[in-house]
Image (cartoon, rainbow, N blue to C red):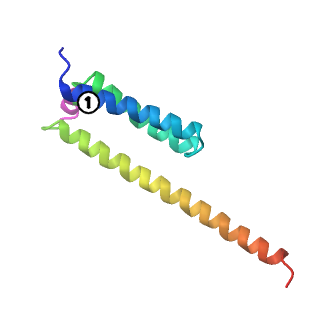
């Protein structure tokens, strides 16, 4: 199987993403939980770069007429799940902040 230019591009993007995420986690710019999510995404892009026919095989097995549409569908689902997880985390942080403000208000003398 010959490697096409877009396979090389995806491979470089996957490696770049993985290195960037590891750098951000190491410098504490991103928590390990979010970093793990993005490392999984980088690994999947590397897998698609190494085995580009995988999306065609999986799409055919699932009975999808145009297998690249499966890739787009999966990308949309991943982004929706990531947005949902981010909203859950934001809600937790805001709840904790509100409780902390209430405790400080009770402790402070008037």
What segment is highlighted magenta in the picture? Answer: 56-63
Which residue shows up at 60% across the image and 66% down it? 94
> Would you say the magenta stretch is mainly helix, strand or loop?
helix
Q: Is residue 74 above or below residue 80?
A: above
Number of residues whose C-alpha sits closer than 10 Å to that of mark 1, classed few (under 14), some (14–19) or many (20 or more): few
Which residue shows up at 46% across the image and 32% down it? 19
- Magenta residue check for 58: yes
Q: Which residue is mark 1?
A: 9
Choose top left, top right, bottom left or bottom right for residue 2. top left
Which residue shows up at 26% across the image and 45% down it? 73
Q: Is residue 100 above or below residue 80?
A: below
* Rendering coords of residue 92 (x, y %): 60, 60
Q: Which residue is the extreme one toward the right?
A: 109
Q: Nearer the viewer, residue 12 or 58?
A: 12
Q: Is residue 110 left or right of residue 63?
A: right
* Rendering coords of residue 45 (x, y %): 33, 32
Q: Quadrant of the C terminus?
A: bottom right
Choose top left, top right, bottom left or bottom right for residue 4. top left
Q: Nearer the viewer, residue 110 or 90?
A: 110
* Rendering coords of residue 80 (x, y %): 37, 53
* Rendering coords of residue 83 (x, y %): 42, 55
Q: Secondary structure at mark 1?
A: helix
Q: How many numbered circles are shown?
A: 1
């Amino acid at each position: 199987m010959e490697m096409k230019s877009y396979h090389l591009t995806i491979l470089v993007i996957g490696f770049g993403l993985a290195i960037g995420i590891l750098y951000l986690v190491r410098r504490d710019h991103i928590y390990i939980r979010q970093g793990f999510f993005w490392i999984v995404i980088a690994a999947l892009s590397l897998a698609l770069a190494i085995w580009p026919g995988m999306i065609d095989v999986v799409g055919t097995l699932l009975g999808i007429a145009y297998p690249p549409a499966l890739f787009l569908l999966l990308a949309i689902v991943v982004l929706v799940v990531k947005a949902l997880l981010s909203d859950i985390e934001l809600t937790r942080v805001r709840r904790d902040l509100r409780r902390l403000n209430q405790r400080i208000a009770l402790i402070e003398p008037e």
